[in-house]
């Protein structure tokens, strides 16, 4: 697998997570049960860091071989 392919995979994962977050937000709007909405909000809160990391890794792998690219310090040694 090349870095370009890996970048595309991370991008797809971020998009899938974003779609799931939209679904959960729609479920919150449709729900009248406070306990259920709390569970949905917690799930969204758990998914947001995964989405952010997938976007960051998609960007990192897309520019991995560029010398002048300013990398996120979180993903460097």
Image: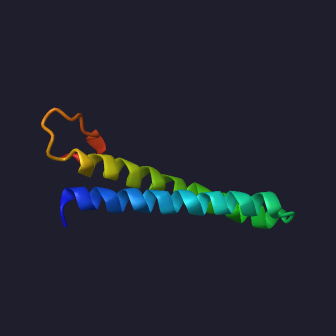
Query: Which sits in the foreground, 72 or 26?
Result: 26
Seen in the image, is 30 located left or right of residue 48?
right
Q: Position of residue 8 (x, y in %)?
A: 32, 58
Seen in the image, is 43 located left or right of residue 6?
right
Query: Which sits in the foreground, 40 or 69?
Result: 69
Seen in the image, is 64 located left or right of residue 45?
left
> Looking at the image, which residue is at 45% across and 57% down?
14
Q: Is residue 42 visible?
A: no
> Looking at the image, which residue is at 33% across and 52% down?
58
Q: Position of residue 47 (x, y in %)?
A: 53, 59
> Looking at the image, which residue is at 69% across and 57% down?
25
Quadrant where the N terminus lies? Answer: bottom left
Q: Position of residue 33 (x, y in %)?
A: 85, 66
The answer to which image quadrant residue 11 occupies is bottom left
Seen in the image, is 66 located left or right of residue 75?
left
Q: Is residue 24 visible?
A: yes
Q: Position of residue 40 (x, y in %)?
A: 69, 63
The answer to which image quadrant residue 42 occupies is bottom right
> Looking at the image, which residue is at 51% across and 61% down?
17
Report the number of discs.
0
**Please, which colouring scheme is shown?**
rainbow
Query: Which sits in the foreground, 53 or 67?
Result: 67
């Amino acid at each position: 697998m090349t870095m370009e392919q890996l970048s595309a995979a991370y991008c797809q994962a971020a998009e899938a997570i974003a779609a799931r977050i939209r679904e959960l937000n729609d479920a919150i709007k449709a729900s009248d049960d406070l306990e259920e909405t709390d569970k949905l909000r917690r799930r969204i809160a758990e998914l947001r860091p995964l989405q952010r990391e997938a976007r960051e890794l998609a960007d990192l792998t897309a520019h991995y071989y560029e010398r002048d690219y300013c990398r996120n310090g979180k993903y460097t040694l």
